[in-house]
Amino acid sequence: MFEKNKILEKNRSSRRAFIKGVIASGTAVSSSGYIFGSLAGCSPDQSVLGSVERLVSLNVNGQTRRVDVLPNETLAMTLRYKLGLTGTKLGCDRGECGACTLLVDGVPNYSCSTLTHSVRDKQVTSIEGLQGPNGELHPVQQAMIDELGPQCGFCTPGQIMSAVALLESNPNPSRDEARQAMSGNLCRCGAYDHYLNSVMKAAERS
Ligand code: FES
Ligand code: FES
């Protein structure tokens, strides 16, 4: 019995370490092959579509980033494949799953369905922008670790961004309000209750 408890505790610790890695920057899950497939699929003509200025300044996580943006490029593509911010995940790439959620002027947005040119005068916050000045985790991230929120972790950055937006606008939500606010984020692993527990814990602590 004692031996079994030791094994269980060891498993929980290594799972917590895994979750911590996912939550800090979303780097445990990567789809780097996606970009090469997607960009390789662009026709040469797409680089000259439209007449908007392509070299733009974006405010991302409090920093000004200069980047060359195609007229039809989505924010998810710009962040992941031009700015190296791979914490934002791409799941469906068609506005259905919420994996790509980030904040535009504090409001949750599906970055796979947001044109980068449309956020030129706005503040974009991705999962990488949540950390404190000394690298400390956001309270929502810490609560996700403490509650062992994610399973595979792929949807986690999007879930966290929605939860952060909720607690900014409503620091003391009911469980139903939290469920409603998180309803745009699907989880193929079905970890919904764990995520809700995490949001409620973060609210309790704030
Ligand atoms: S990847 Fe954007 S909603 Fe699914
Ligand atoms: S934790 Fe696996 S998809 Fe949500």
Image (cartoon, grey):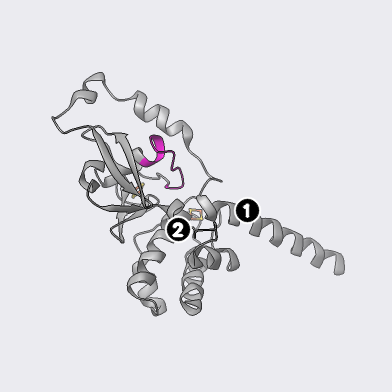
| Residue 47 place in picture, x, y as percent | 24, 24
Q: Residue at x 51, y 62 (%)?
A: 141
Q: Identify the amino acid type marked 1.
A: Phe
In the rendered structure, which disc, 1 or 2, sits on the residue that comes first in sequence?
1
Magenta stretch: dominant secondary structure: loop
Q: Quadrant of the N terminus?
A: bottom right
Residue 41, located in which quarter of the rendered image?
top left
Q: Which residue is mark 2?
A: 130
Q: Is residue 136 above or below residue 42?
A: below
Q: Residue at x 44, y 60 (%)?
A: 160
Residue 19, located in which quarter of the rendered image?
bottom right
Q: Within the magenta stretch, is there residue 56?
A: no
Q: Residue furthest right?
A: 2
The stretch of residues the image draws in magenta is 79-88
Q: Within the magenta stretch, is there residue 86?
A: yes
Evaluate whether residue 1 shows in this view: no
| Residue 74 place in picture, x, y as percent | 28, 40
Q: Residue at x 51, y 75 (%)?
A: 201
Foreground disc of the pair 1, 2: 2
How would you rate the neighbour count of disc 2 (Cα within 10 Å): few for under 14, some for 14-19, many for 20 or more?
A: many
Q: Identify the amino acid type marked 2.
A: Leu
Mark 1 C-beta closer than 8 Å to ligand 2: no
Are dots 1 and 2 in contact, CB under 8 Å? no
- 6 or 59, nearer to the observer: 59
| Residue 191 place in picture, x, y as percent | 51, 62
Q: Which residue is mark 1?
A: 18
Q: Is residue 199 above or below residue 186?
A: below
Q: Residue at x 46, y 51 (%)?
A: 128
